[in-house]
Image (cartoon, rainbow, N blue to C red):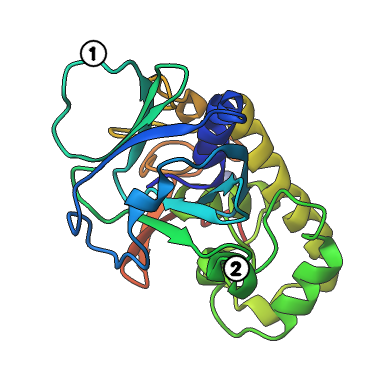
Amino acid sequence: MPELPEVETIRRGLAGLAGRRVQQVRWARASLRGKTVRSLEELRGRTICGLDRHGKFLLVRLDDASTFVVHLGMTGKLLLGRPGDDPRPHTHLEVGLDDGSTLRYIDPRRFGSLRLEAPGAIPPEVSRYGPDAVSSHFTPQSLQENLRQSRAPLKAFLLDQSKVAGIGNIYACEALWRAGLSPRRSANRTPRGRIPLLHKSIVEVLTEAIGLGGTSFNDYVDSIGRPGTFVAKLAVFQREGEACPRCASKVRRIVQSGRSTFYCPKCQR
Ligand SMILES: [Zn+2]
């Protein structure tokens, strides 16, 4: 599933769309699992002012102060192409722009969501979610405050978007490995003195992954179809049985809240 670094890579790849006007919209209504609040046909005639991101959500700002909110779900892709490009299976939305380019949303498993927020409305993803993990609003102090109030295991805490937005399974495992903290430890039992390192580990792993265009296993590609290369830098994620890069113990896999967690039982405490 695309997490913060993958969505940020896509956002950067599409930043040049600012100033482009939407000329055509082809939308396969009701083809995605998520509910649609307004008709995406209303995108026609709008000019793109800029692209923002909050956590895993891409926020396309439009000239009437509305926001087109994209969540890639499990297998969503936003691909920039030309109108004459071969049709691709699982295309749910095709937006023709005034420079002749076409933006397509492709999603085989259909867990993504595409939503047009009313002019001036703040997308609920921004108002309900915690601070974006690479923004200045995410600080060691805000992290400490939230940790204190949660009894969830650290791994589950990091996946909770209302605490901090943008971290998914891959980067939760990697950040906890970097911080030397066990994913099973209760959030409110994180020693105060170790919180700055946890904060630093989260920000660093996400920032490094952005620098390498994200992590690709099977599905994720950027806006022109290139995979990310952070997979070579993963210390523990999907490395069960391999040697921990820090202490050479075997990386273990456990299941927490129905999802795999990878960690080093020796040097993560
Ligand atoms: Zn280790």
Horizontal and vertical percent for residue 206?
63, 42
Q: Residue at x 44, y 50 (%)?
A: 70
Residue 183 visible? The answer is no
Q: Residue at x 61, y 29 (%)?
A: 19
Q: Disc 1 designates what residue?
A: 84
- Asked whether 209 or 85 is in front, the reply is 85
Which residue type carries mark 1?
A: Gly
Residue 51 visible? The answer is yes
Give the vertical position of 143 relative to 263 (above or below). below
Residues packed near mark 2 inside 10 Å, few (<14), some (14 to 19) or many (20 plus): few
Horizontal and vertical percent for residue 152?
55, 80
Give the vertical position of 255 relative to 148 (above or below). above
Horizontal and vertical percent for residue 59?
56, 50
**Residue 247 sits in which quadrant?**
top right
**Mark 2 or mark 1, earlier in chain:** 1
Mark-to-mark CA distance, 2 and 1: 35 Å
Look at the numbered disc 2 and say if its residue's Cβ is closer than 8 Å to ligand 1: no
- Asked whether 161 or 217 is in front, the reply is 161
Which residue type carries mark 2?
A: Ala
Q: Disc 2 designates what residue?
A: 121
Q: Residue at x 72, y 73 (%)?
A: 190
Q: Residue at x 61, y 32 (%)?
A: 210
